[in-house]
Amino acid sequence: MMAADRNFFAYLDDMKIITILLPLSYHHGLSSSFSMTCDFQEHPLNIIEKRQIDNNMKYICEFSKEYSFEKQYLVTDEHGGKTELQIGAVIRTKAFDEKFYYDGDDLGVTFEEGQTRFKLWAPTATQVKIKLRPANSSFSEFVKMKREERGVWSVAVSRDLEFFQYSFLILVNQEWREAIDPYATAVTANGELGVIVRLEKTHRQRIPLPPFENPVDAIIYETHIRDLTIHPHSGVTNKGLYLGAGEHNTKGRDGGPTGLAYIKDLGVTHIEFLPFHDFAGVDELNRDKEYNWGYNPLHFNAPEGSYSTDPSAPYARIIELKQLIDQVHKLGLRVIMDVVYNHVYIRETSSFEKVVPGYYFRHNEMGLPSNGTGVGNDIASERKMVRKYIIDSIQFWLKEYHIDGFRFDLMGILDIQTMQEIRKVCDCLSPGTIILGEGWNLNTPLPVDQKAIIGNQAKMPQIAQFNDKFRDCIKGSSFNLFDKGFAFGNEHYIEAANEVITGSIGFTKEGTALFNEPIQSVNYVECHDNHTMWDKLLACLPSADDSLRMKYHRLATGIVLLSQGIPFLHSGQEFFRTKKGDGNSYRSSDEVNQLDWDRMISYKNQVEYIKGLIQVRKEFPCFRMRTAAQIRKNIQQLQLPSPLLGYWFNNDDGIILLINPSIKKQEVLLTVRDWAVLVDHENAGITTIRMLDGRDLIIEPVSINVLLKK
C-alpha cells in the first residue's frame, strides 16, 4: 500500500496496544470500530481511549491475540478505510527486549567449513536480503535470508566470499532500507560498504608487557594519531598514519626523540589515542583536505581508513593499526582506545536506525529522539541488544587488537549496568584493563540513578572518571576563559585545591568526597577539548610576561602529576602546547592541531622538568596511594599560611610536598633538619638537587617542591 493510499495511520506501541491516528479531515476523525487483518483472518480491536491531538483523533486500541512480528497486518475502520500496521514504540518496551534478546556470539559474518554465514538481528523486519558484490565489480547478487528465533535472520553461502563487499536490505514498515552490517569488521573507503575478511590472517602474538598493579600507577598521555606525526619536523616517514605513529627511533631537528620514542622517553605508561574506529568528517581518499578528531562514529568495529596507507584496501587499515599497537607494546607502553558509544554521526543514516528503526536510540516524552549528547541522538544503552552490542564491541577490541584500556566519551549518556558489565568483561579477558570516562550528567531520558555519572561513582568503584572539579579549581573554569584557578594564583580555590590534591575523597573535614577511592579520579588540567592551558594563560594574563605564564603552567602540570589519583596529560602540555587560541579545534587545520616538535625543542628545559616529576611519581609510592584509607592514614597536612599548601607523607618514603601559587617568596620552618631537595622551581627528579642543613626553607614564587628526609 502506497503512503498516498492510506486513510489514516496505525502503530504497534506495545505488545497488545495499537495507536490509531485519524485525521479530522477524514470523517471528522470519528470511527466507532477498528479491526486488524492478517492471513485473511479479521480480529476486532477494543477501543480503550480516544482524544484529539492537534489535527488528529487519537485512538488507543487493544489487540486480544498475540502479535506476530513475522507477518504484515492491515487495520480497517468502520468506513472501509485501511492502512498497514506499522511498528511503533513497541520496540522501546521491556516486553520487546525480553522477547527478542539474543545472546549468541555469531552476529555479523562467521566462517564454517566451506561456508560463509551471515546473521543480522532485525526483529521488526518482514524480509531481509543480503547484497553481495565482488571487489572491483559492479555486479551484485541478492540472497534471501531466513528468519530464525529471537528476531535473527540468517543465511549460509557455500563458497569463498573473501573480499566481497556486502550490505543488508531490510523491509520494515513496508519500506526497504539498505544498511551496512553493524558488526562489520572491515569496510570500503569511507565506510560505504562492509567487506568480508578473514581476520585470522591478521592475527599475531600478544606482546608481553611490564606489570601494572593499580590504576593510580598509570600516567596517561592523550594524543591524536595525525597530530602526533604530521609536523614537517616530526622525523616521521609515514606522517599522519598508523604506521607513522608506530615508528621507533624518530628524531627531530636537534637529534632528540620525537613521536613514539619521545613518549617513551617522557616516562608515561599509557597512550590514549583519540578515536580510531571508522568515523565521518574526513574523506579517506583525500585525507589531507580535511581534519577531524574522530567523534563522528560510523562503524564501531572497523578501523578508520584515513590513517591507513591504502583506505581502499580492507586489510591495510586492520594490519597497520595492529602494527601500531604492537609497536607501542614493544616499548612497554599500553594503549587506551577512545570509544564513542554514546551516539552515532547521523541517526537517520546509521546502520542501527536502518536495521531496527527507533530501537537503538532514546526518545523523549514526545516520542522524538533525545539529544543529551548535543549531536542529535543518544544511544539507548539500557536496552538489552544495545548493551550487548557495546559489550560485544569491547570484547572484539580486547581480543582482536589487544587494547589495554578504554576511555568512554560522554560516559554519562550510558547506563550503570552497561558499564558494570563492561568492567566484568575486561576483568575476565584482560585483567588490568583501565576504564575511564566522562561522567557528565547530561539531559538524556534515563533515570538519574541509572546514569554512569560522577554522582553515581559508588556504583562503579572500578571505573575512573574525569575529575572536572580538579580541572576547574587548579586551572580555572574551562567554560570561562578568564577564570583563574589555584595554580594561577587564585587563593579562593585553596580549600578545593586541598581536597582534589588529596584524591577528592573527603580528606578535609570541610571537604565533600567526590569519589570513594583515588583510583576513580582522573586528574587533569588540559585535554583535547577547550583551550590549551597556554592559550588560557594568554587570555587570563594578557599583560604578564611569558616567564610568569610558564611558572603557572609548570605548577598546574606539577600538581596533576603529584596529586592522589590518576594523572592525565594532553600531548604537548609539557612544552606549552598552543592551538593559536582555537578553543574547539575538532576540525581545524593541521597547523592548529599538530604537535609542534620545534616548540618541544625550544622548551626542552620544561620537558625535562616534567620528565623529572614523572620519575618522582613513579619512584615514590606516597604519590600514588591505592586507597582512601591509606591517604587518610599517611598524609598529614602542614599548617602553613595561605595560599601555601603542604603535606607530610609519614609513611616509609618520608616526603614533604610544598606548593606556593603566589608571586612572592614564602618562608617555611621545617620541624626537623636534613632534607634532600628533589623538586624545586627549576629542577625535578629523583636525584638530590641540594641538601637543607637547617630548618628554614625559602620557597620560590609559583613553584612546587618535594623534599626527601635523609
Image (cartoon, grey):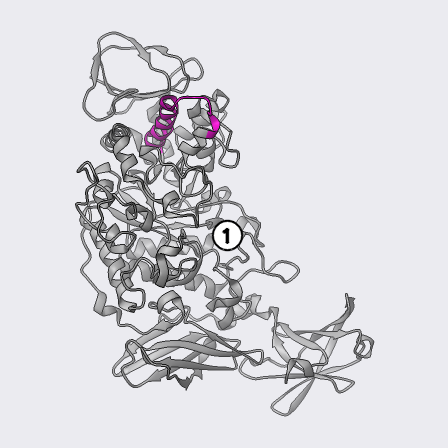
> Where is residue 558 drawn, in percent x and y?
33, 28
Return the x and y of residue 49 as percentages of the image width and height.
Answer: 76, 70
How packed mark 1 is, by other alpha carbons closer than 10 Å (few <14, some 14-19, many 20 or more), is: many
Q: Which residue is drawn at 47% across and 60% down?
A: 344
Closer to the camera, 214 or 197? Answer: 197
- The answer to whether 699 is drawn above or below residue 151 in the figure is above
| Dominant SS in magenta | helix
Direction right: furthest residue: 28
* Residue 238, above or below 221: below
Task: Give SS at disc 1.
Answer: helix
Residue range highlighted in magenta: 539-564
Q: Mark 1 points at which residue?
A: 413
Image side of residue 244 versus residue 69, left or right = left
| Residue 556 painted magenta | yes
Residue 82 at what x, y percent from top left? 70, 84
The reply to whether the magenta stretch includes residue 204 is no
Does any portion of residue 696 appear in the rendered image? yes
- Which residue is located at x 36 percent, y 60 percent? 286
Residue 107 x/y as whole percent:
38, 72
**Does residue 525 lie above or below 9 as drawn?**
above
Foreground residue among 88 and 681? 681
- Residue 670 appearing in the image: no
On-image quarter of the N terminus:
bottom right
Q: Which of 686 and 95 is in front in this view?
A: 686
Q: Quadrant of residue 667?
A: top left
Q: Please state if 382 lies on the left or on the right of 548 as rendered.
A: right
Dot 1 amino acid type: Ile
